[in-house]
Image (cartoon, rainbow, N blue to C red):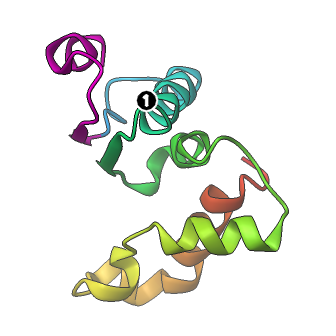
Amino acid sequence: LSLVRVATQGAPSTFIMETPEASLDGLAMERVGAALAKFAQSSGNRLIVTSNLSNAGLITSLFNGPTKDDAEVAARRGRLVNLLQIAAPNRALDRDRAKYEQLLDRAVTGDQL
């Protein structure tokens, strides 16, 4: 992110990345999420990340932490592309769709992470 800031000289930019769930622990992922959220909120930047549900704390951090506010939850959902709904399902999703949806709900709200 520092390189993006220097290269763009503070101009708005778009940063696209796959999140590194396999190489970082849960606490590190939360710090990464907080840093990405800060980047996305400054200077008109845009952030696009792909993430799986193996470390849902990252998703919560990208949204600036837990919330119980219904309007905020709706706004967060409006900023997601939910592949659980639009992608072709695999066997695991066919078998446990409700559990995967619950994981996503908890990631969006930060509930019980």
Name which residue lies at 50% across and 33% down.
33
Name which residue lies at 22% across and 20% down.
4
Residue 1: x and y in percent read 30, 19
The reply to whether the magenta stretch includes residue 44 is no
Name which residue lies at 38% across and 89% down.
94
Q: Up-down: is 102 above or below 43?
A: below
Residue 84: x and y in percent read 39, 79
Looking at the image, the residue that sits furthest to the right is 68
- The residue closer to the viewer here, 103 or 39, is 39
Say which residue label 1 marks: 39
Residue 55: x and y in percent read 50, 43
91 lies left or right of 75: left
Mark 1 residue type:
Phe
94 lies left or right of 75: left
Residue 27: x and y in percent read 59, 23
33 lies left or right of 94: right
- Numbered range of the magenta stretch: 1-18
The reply to whether the magenta stretch includes residue 12 is yes
Residue 74, image quadrant? bottom right
